[in-house]
Image (cartoon, rainbow, N blue to C red):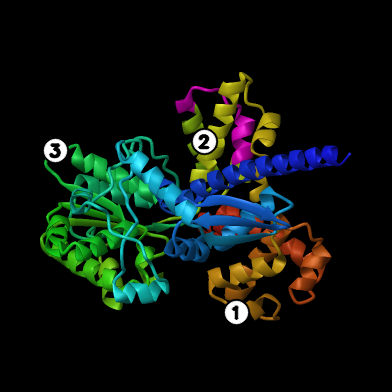
Amino acid sequence: MEKAQSQDAALASSDTASSLKISWLRICERLKNEVGDVEYRMWIQRITLGPLDEDEITLYLPERFLRDWVRGQYGQRLQTLWREESHTVQHVELRVDKKAQRSSNAEREASSSTPKTTPFDPDIQTLVKEDIAALDRETTTTLPSSVNEVRNDLAVPLDRRFTFDNFVVGKPNEFAYACAGRVADHPASPGFNPLFLYGGVGLGKTHLMHAIGLKLMSRGNISVAYMSAEKFMYRFIASMQSKSQMEFKEQLRSVDVLMIDDLQFLIGKNSTQEEFFHTFNALVDAGRQIIVSADKSPSDLSGLEDRLRTRLGCGMVADIHATTFELRISILEAKAKASGTPVPPKVLEYLAHKITTNVRELEGALNRLIAHADLVGRPVTLESTQDVLKDMLKAHERRVTIDEIQRKVAEHFNIRLTDMSSARRARAVARPRQIAMYLAKQLTSRSLPEIGRKFGNRDHTTVMHAVSRVSELMEQDPGLAESVELLRHMLEG
């Protein structure tokens, strides 16, 4: 009897371990879609799955520096994803484990004999004092074994899939696309140097940067260096450790075009900002082109030095808005056509409605559908879409509250939150209030009387009038329609 119970317990433990591994693979895939390949390989891929103790899962990292970094940057997201993937996991603990260190080293040694698609080695012995203080962490890692590896691997190769031809243009990105095309045709032209692209995750900033670089390099006599801001920092620090600062500076300042992605990473990194500032000035003074991307405009990047923020805003600043439904449909149609696998229009519409904030996730969802159809030999249907993507679609389901709508609309139109429930009838206040009522009706399940009570105990007929009026104005005023759609996407995201 005891032997049978022991066997049952062992089987249950084995099933749990397998389930955890599957959940972890799904979480890794979702994080990879969210943060991108480079950031995923630098941080997430170095995590090792540990045991489950009651409702707490342990994840291991090989070094304290990595553990602290991942905890600060991804700790909350990891916990959220685990709770969504497994009802048994409620807490995530990140720890340092020497076995993970040896495993990580073995993987690096094994991979060193093969070409690296994204050359990046985050191992460094120390950070510059100011940057250590900004990161508020300690590190005991070491420099790359070869200084030549650092010198020869200054920039990341451009991805030849990211061209102007396969960039889908719509109203949210047409200005940024036009600016990118202008710089690719006439680099360092007045008014376009630097070119600063900003917008949310997965909206196409990196695609446009690669497209510019590829077009410029196709001419044959233009040198282009593309790297993330994080890589810029690590290369700068590595050059200091190897006493090759001058070589690093000369290499950077000798290129015709320098592209720095995700500049927001430099916030709080004072020494690295200083180096980038001088590199920026040297290149602009020499008539070389600089292209930068970030998640916010220069004026909103609090934490950057004023002089650097001013320099970044002196050229062309182009934003990429959240995608519209029409743009998402166009992207999906283009990708589906390129794949050669038939995807029904109703499936594309379903995806465009469900995944609204991140083009990268949208494309990833379509790729999963197409791969599933090819592997199992069944056509793509709405039913199979809901089944194959149930984990991804679940992550995008969220309940929007009226309080959240009022706050977002007030911020967007620069009015006080109290104006949402005040008696003021000035148009500058009344119109945003009507838009908030309209969005409350569209995005929540609240009744008209309930919505009215949230807006200063107004009658339900007032809400009806607001919804009707905003609907009319959206048809007459494209600018208002765009603002309402932008607010909708922000709230649904």
Tell me: residue 297, above or below residue 186: below
Residue 302 forms part of the magenta stretch: no
Element under label 3? loop
Tell me: residue 203, above or below residue 286: above
Residue ID at (32%, 50%):
120
- Real-space Cα distance between discs 1 and 2? 39 Å
Of helix, strand and loop, which mostly describes the magenta segment?
A: helix
- Real-space Cα distance between discs 3 and 1? 55 Å
Residue ID at (38%, 51%):
205
Q: Residue 64 or 460: which is nearer the viewer?
A: 64
Q: Which residue is mark 2?
A: 332
Provide the residue span drawn in magenta: 337-351
Q: Foreground mark, 3 or 2?
A: 3
What is the number of the mark on residue 220? 3
Pointers 3 and 2 in contact (C-beta within 8 Å): no
Amino acid type, residue under disc 1 in the picture: Arg
| Residue 408: x %, y % from top left | 60, 68
